[in-house]
Every structure is written in structure tokens, then in C-alpha cells.
Amino acid sequence: MDLEQTAVQRELRQEVRAALATVPASDGITFQTRRDVDTALGRAGLLGVTWPREFGGRGLGLLDALAIEQELVNAGFPVTMQPSRFAVNLLGPGLHRHGSDAQRREWLPRILRADDIWCQGFSEPDAGSDLASVRTTAVDRGDGLRLNGRKIWTTQAQLADRCFVLAKTDPDAPRYRNLSMLIVDMRDPGVSVSPIIQATGDNEFNEVTFDDVAVDPRNVVGEPGNGWQVAITTLSAERTYGQLSRFTKFGREFQHLLDDLDPTDETAHREAGHLAARLAGIRALALRTAALEDSGRREEAAGLASILKLWWSETHQDLTSAGWAAEARSDNGDSYWWWRAIESRSETIAAGTSQIQRNIIAERGLGLPRVR
Amino acid sequence: MVSLTYDADEQSLLDEARRQAAGILPWDRLKDSRETADAWAKFAAHGWQAVYLPEGLDGGALSLPVLLGLARVAGERLAVEEFVGNVFLMPTLASRLKDPAARARVLAADPGTSFLLADGRTQDPTAPEPDADCRWVCGVLEGARPVRVVPSTDALTFQMWAPDAYTYEPLGDVALGVGTVHVTGAPDDALELDLTIEELRGLLRTAQLVHAAALVGAAAEALRVSVEYVSVREQFGRRIGEFQAVKHILADVATHNEAAWATCLYAGCSEAPADIAAAHILAADAVRGASAAMVQVHGGMGFTWEHPSHLFLKTAMVGARRFDPDRQLADARELDVTSEVTVAAQEGR
């Protein structure tokens, strides 16, 4: 075991620094700055480094990807906030595994260059945790494949060029075999986006309506009817990237908490010590997940990814709650924790609620009986 | 070079240890102090007590991360305190005896056992007074020898008593090896150590990490037994493991266990005090939760003397008080959140 960086990792970080140096200067970090970073990373071949070489990646392990992540988070560009993440980290693995050769030729190079802004059309008003119950349909009634339905919680849809959409293509097929993944152009007639204002007051996600949108059959990923498989591939990829950057991000907030603590409040100090231990748990779980994945123990890595999701999201909520409580007793102003404490409530809901994670851990990890 | 995982050789050593420990160290031994001591002696006779000693002292020269794996195996058998004392702490201390002849003699006592005369709640090595009750001494097995490390002006002295030179009043009703010890008379041996007080504190810090790994082992075993039970026990016409209320209890246990274990492995690489403190805090949480869940999901059976649940529960209760929990929380607050985190990739990279 070793905590030193390898020569490869040092080299990667150097490459990231060089790429970031080419990003045009901006006044603060905006969406456009993040786009510029994606473009620079793409130009330097630093997007999708874990993709297999045959698909244009570098075939690197997750631990090497973590080195890149660390460099990016230090510069203020955590992977989990980059516009490219949906295509590079979610759709990409789905195309590798399930896409046709033609689809891979068409889309993978564009994704690696960050040519398009993508969004992910999974959740619906009536299909959140129960994703396989999506009602959006894409059926051919004689005038080609037509997409109809509503998607919700669609991050960056208001800016997106394309969306990968999970839709029901065979209403008569059994559950899990009735879905397909479609690639949709967000500028096509019939696509409309309305913003959803979150509890924080921000507009990060949207509701997307598809009203008789024509979809070219060649934009059905892989085989029609295997959409659930594609979705599963992307969902498990979602839990294995960008995890270490959470440690760094929450670590900075933790330093803030320590500054806010009343020096005489021993209980709060004990609580902070406990939070620090849980933060150490995030770092260790992120690294171990990557190490297991890299040594070919994919099943274990996937199980640990759900554990990590549950662990970091609940730890972060407790951190922001402690911060909000500490701030009340400090003279350090009262604006640091407000937004964070509210925003962190979304983290046990997005990307699989804590309850769904617990089901996954119990059923897939511990082998407890499934009931549906 | 591996990272936070074991290679095939390391894993097969741990598997062999697990196989032997399962046969030699039944949980029920904790209901009888004589059996507890005999079982440990048998385990030690298989050579497991010398695995961490350097090769020059006929030891197995295990790395710390692999020792943690072995501690986890011992923890599964609820051999927490005797493992920390006899596999890590005592052999390491004895290996630092200045006089080679004395060192050989003390080490040759294997598979004889010993325990450190110190309050396990604070683990302050300088605290114990001679001829007074020493509370919360840990790792006491019948027939074991007390060892005291005495600071003097220029060096530390290693004092060792005969197995019959003390009285022992155990804590609680099962043989956890924790209780009040009163030594009588002068030590048999008073030997000079090649060790500073700072180094001794470092050793105790590592002992804390080994202890954490053993607690994770107990937590993991509590979970395994619980999963096995809820997968067969039926109520309302179905296996209780089908109920989400039960599933989620065990999913939370699994989550805490994995977080604690990953943190132990990380601390085994970094050896930073804050990381070790974090590992112990999470391990104590994990075993507390796992043993409580074990009692709960077993229902009334889990609250009987016959069922092993209470042995796990008591191991957790003792474990949570060890190595100065308040000090650990203070150490953990020093967690270095700004430093670069990198881990080398797999073998051959």
C-alpha cells in the first residue's frame, strides 16, 4: 500500500495545469468558464481518460483519474460541476457498452472534445426513484418515431444541445424490456424547457417537455428495448466519478466550521471531531472504491459506490447543520451556511435517494431478498 | 505496490488465518475465562503471535496494513484485546529491549502472553502507580504476565511480573480481558528499553489503529450473522429480511462498517495521528451500531445469554471506551483536509 503519487499521476497533473493555463481569463467562475475548461481539457486529451483506448480514451484507472480530479478541484473546477460530466461520465460508458459502431463513431469524438452540452432525461414527475416506470413514449405510428412526455430535474437542460432520454418504446413488452435510450436534439421542434426554481432560489434544473418530437431511429442507443441496461450502466458510472472532490470541498467547509465554533463549547468541538472522522471516511471510501475498480473487483466497487453516496450525502448534511448552528453563536456573519444547509438537503435525493441506496446496499451488497 | 486492497498472497494469508481462527476461537469461550486463555494459547501456538516481529527476531515481518487485516480476523472471533496486546504491542515492545539475551528470553516466552499495566481508557503509559489498583487494564488472560513501562530520567524500563504476582477483578460478566489489576511484590525483570517516551506514544497510537481494525472485524461478523438470520427467519409468512425496515438497519450497518474499514486501511498507509483517530472513532461507531442491530434483528433470542449477540455488544461497549475517546475527537479535528490526496495505482504501475 502506498499513498505516494506515481510518475503517471504527476505527469497527468502537470498536463492539467498546462491545459488550465490556456483557459481565457474571466471575472469569477461562470458556466462559460467551465465550458472553456472543458474545451481546454478536451483539446489536451484530458476528458474521458478512463475510457478504453479504442474509444479515444487513455485506458487509465480510476486512481489516475482521481489525480486529475484533485488538480481540477484545487483550481475550482470539480468534475462534478463541469458541463461535460453528463456526456463524458454517464453517456460515454453507456455508448461504449451498448452503442452501435456507427453511434460510437458519431458521438464519442464529439464528447471527448466537449463539442456539445448534454443533459440527462431520466426522471419524470411520476417516475423518480421508480425509474423503470417512465411514461415518456417513443413509438412509431406510421410517421416515424415520435417522442412524447415530460422529464424533470433535468440539470442544464436550458443550455443543452442534446439530451439522452429514457423512453418507453414498446408498451407491450414486460417491465425492464420496454425501454430504449434515445439521443435527442434539444433544438428540434416540440422540445420545450421550463426552469424549476429550487429551494435555494437557484435554477439548476428544469422540466423538459417533448411534444411529438421526431427522433431518427439511428439515435436509439444500441438495440431498441435495452434502454434499462443502458440506464443502469450510466447510473452506476454516476456513482464512481468525481467522488474525491467532495472530500476537498467539504474539507474546506469543515475548516469554516472550526472557525465558527465557540471556543468554550466542548460539545460542539466533540461533534466537529466526529464530523472530521466521517470526512476521513469519505476520502477513504472514494480511494478504496477506485482501488477496487482498478484491480478488477468491479462488483465490490459498485457496492461500495452506493455506500459512499449514502455516506457523503448524510455526512454533508450533518456538517452543514453543525455549521448553521455554530454560526448562530459566532460573530463571523451569517451568510456562509444558509445556502449550503439548504442545498445539502438535495444530496440525499438526487442520483438515487438514500432509501434507494439502502435498498441497493441491502439487496445487491448483502444479498437480502428482493421484493417488488 | 497496491492501494487500499490486498494482493493475492496477502489475501491467502488472511484467509488461512480466518479458517484457523474460526476453529480455535469460538465466541462462547468468552463465557469462561479459562477457556478464553486456552483458546488464545492455541491460536498463538500456530505462530500468529510472532507475525509482526521483524525477520531478524524470527518474526513474520508483516506490513502494518496486513496486520490490520489480521486484526480484523481476530476481531471477528472477538479476540480484540488479546490480539492488540499479544500480537502487536508486547512483541513490539520486547523487540526494543536493549539487552539481546533478555530480548531473546522474553520473546521466547511465546506463546506465553502478557498485558500492559495501564488504564486502557486513557492508555497513558506513564500513569500507573505501583502497589495500587490499576483500573481498566486490557488484554488480561489467565496466566498472563503484567508488564509495566516505567519512565526514568534517561530511558524507559520494561518491568515484567510473574503470572501469579497479581490479583485481577474482571469488568462485567464475561471474559473480555478487561478489569482491575493489582500487582504485588517486585517485578521478576526490570530491563532497559531502547525506546523514547515519544516512540512509546507512537506505538500506542499504532495499537489504537490495530484495535480499530479488530473492532471492524467484530462489526463485520455481527453483520454477517445478522444477515444470515434475517434471510431465514420468517414472520407474517415471509423472511424478515424482505422488510425494508429490517433491510435498512443492516444497510446502515454495512455502510458504517465499510467506511470504518476503508479509513483503517487509509490510516495504515498514512499513519497520521488524525487519520488513526478517525479510524478508531468510525470503528467504535461501527461496532456499536452493528452489535445493537444484531441484538435487535434477532428479537428476543438476541437478548438471551445463550445467543452470542451480547458478547458482541459487550465487546463494542468496552471498545468504545478505549484509547481516550475525547482525545481521539480532538486529534480527528486536526484532519488535514487541505493536503493533496493521491494513491498509487495497482501493481506494476
Image (cartoon, coloured by chain):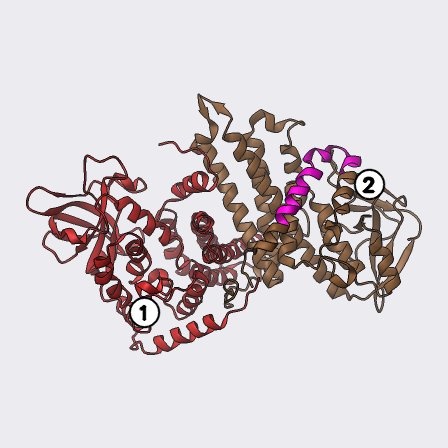
Is residue B132 in the magenta section?
no
What amino acid is at disc 1? Ile
Q: Where is residue A294 in the image (x, y as percent from the top left)?
A: 46, 58
Residue A318 in the image: state x and y as whole percent.
Answer: 46, 50
- Residue B121 in view here: no
**Considering the numbered disc 2 on the image, is that residue within a helix, a strand or a loop?**
loop
Q: Which chain is red?
A: A
Location of residue B59 (image quadrant):
bottom right
The image quarter in which residue A64 lies: bottom left
The stretch of residues the image draws in magenta is B14-36
B15 drawn magenta: yes
Q: Nearer the viewer, mark 2 or mark 1?
A: 2
Chain B in the picture: what colour? brown
* Residue assigned mark 2: B142
Residue toward you, A115 or A83? A115
Name the magenta segment's main secondary structure.
Answer: helix
B24 or B129: nearer the viewer: B24
Q: Do labels 2 and 1 share a chain?
A: no
Query: Which residue was labeled with disc 1?
Result: A29
**B317 shown above or below A332:** above
